[in-house]
Amino acid sequence: MRGVISAFSIMFGCALTPFALAGFWVADEISGSGRYVTDVAPTAADPAVRDAVADSVTAAISRSLDGMDRPATADLVRRSVNAVVTGGDFPAVWAELNRAAHRRVVSVLRDGPGRAVPDGVELDLTPVYGMARRELAAAGQAGASRLPDLHPRIELFPVRALLGARTACDWLVRLKWALPLLPVLPLAAGVVLAGDRGEALSGAGFGLAASMVALTAGLAAVRSLCLPLPAGGGPPSPAVYSIFDALALFPRIGLRVVFAAGLITAGVVAVVREHRSSRESPPVPDPGGSEAPALVQGGMRCSSRGSRWRHERR
């Protein structure tokens, strides 16, 4: 009975580990904007992010310039916008845009959609648009000063995707620091109750490694199939995939650490058991060992004595 309980506890702990790791990740990203912005800020150097921002701002400027007497060429507009997204000020602007988007996410999760986020959580590119207008004016485009105040945006996901997970996210944030301990308790109980603790440790190690493989497949499935689609339809912006990859860096590092720890544990147990078995096993007698030489040597002594006795009689 103890063996069954031990095996069940170890399996339950291994199965719980991916959910605990993913839950801690989600809670950590939601609970404070500092972690979120730190993870997302490096994507300012991602060409996919720059292209997505440039496409949105270029489209907004081009639509406004089309009705003017001397509209700017598409090439001039694109070069001006590219100068902004590849400039030294863009990383700081990008970090601030994501900080504002994170505040909208927290607002939706805590207070509902409200008035600030009518349809979805978006990246408001107004600062980039203003910088592009100034770049156009510096390039000699007279109509740049007459461009209206526009607010180009990149939609991250609809509000309904957040509202559906509101209760779950609330509990994850509350239990954030308890989540890593959830799989430890059944794993420890399973090892303690096992008749062969070495075998239990080895099984736990392999089980943790297998659970991390499952978590890797789950993250890949979420990225490919489960990212929320924009409210207006169509696929997510390429910037959304870059942001997800940046946010998923933490669980990917964590799962690699747990995977390696599981395999190392199983390997150490195997080495220790092999070493003990080699020390405790009795020596195997060698048929051509020490006894045969003794007999041979004794025979030689007897033979020599017999020869000397015969010689004395003569």
Image (cartoon, rainbow, N blue to C red):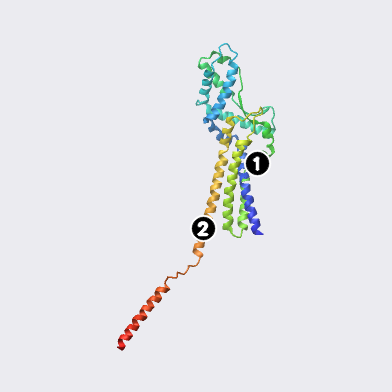
Residue hosting label 1: 172
Q: Where does residue 209 sit, x and y in percent of width and height?
A: 57, 48
Question: Residue at coordinates 34% horizontally, 82% vertically from top-left?
Answer: 305
Distance from disc 2 to disc 1, alpha carbons, whole Å, reads 39 Å
Residue 269 to residue 117: above or below: below
Residue hosting label 2: 272
Q: Where does residue 191 sit, x and y in percent of width and height?
A: 60, 56
Disc with the residue nearer the chain's start (2 vs 1):
1
Q: Is residue 132 visible?
A: yes
Quadrant holding the N terminus: bottom right
Crowdedness near tag 1: few (<14), some (14–19) or many (≥20) residues, C-alpha within 10 Å: many
* Quarter location, residue 236: top right
The disc label shown at residue 31, or none: none
In what element is the residue under mark 1?
Answer: helix
Query: Tag count in the figure?
Result: 2
- Three-letter amino acid code at the position of disc 2: Val
* Quarter location, residue 43: top right
Quadrant holding the C terminus: bottom left
View extreme (bottom): residue: 313
Residue 284 to residue 258: above or below: below
Q: Where does residue 134 sit, x and y in percent of width and height?
A: 54, 18
- Three-letter amino acid code at the position of disc 1: Leu
Q: Nearer the viewer, residue 296 or 67?
A: 296
Q: Nearer the viewer, residue 147 or 50?
A: 50
Residue 125 to residue 269: above or below: above
Q: Are marks 2 and 1 in contact (CB under 8 Å)?
A: no
Question: Is residue 199 left or right of 293 when viewed as pictured?
Answer: right
Q: Nearer the viewer, mark 2 or mark 1?
A: 2
Crowdedness near tag 2: few (<14), some (14–19) or many (≥20) residues, C-alpha within 10 Å: few
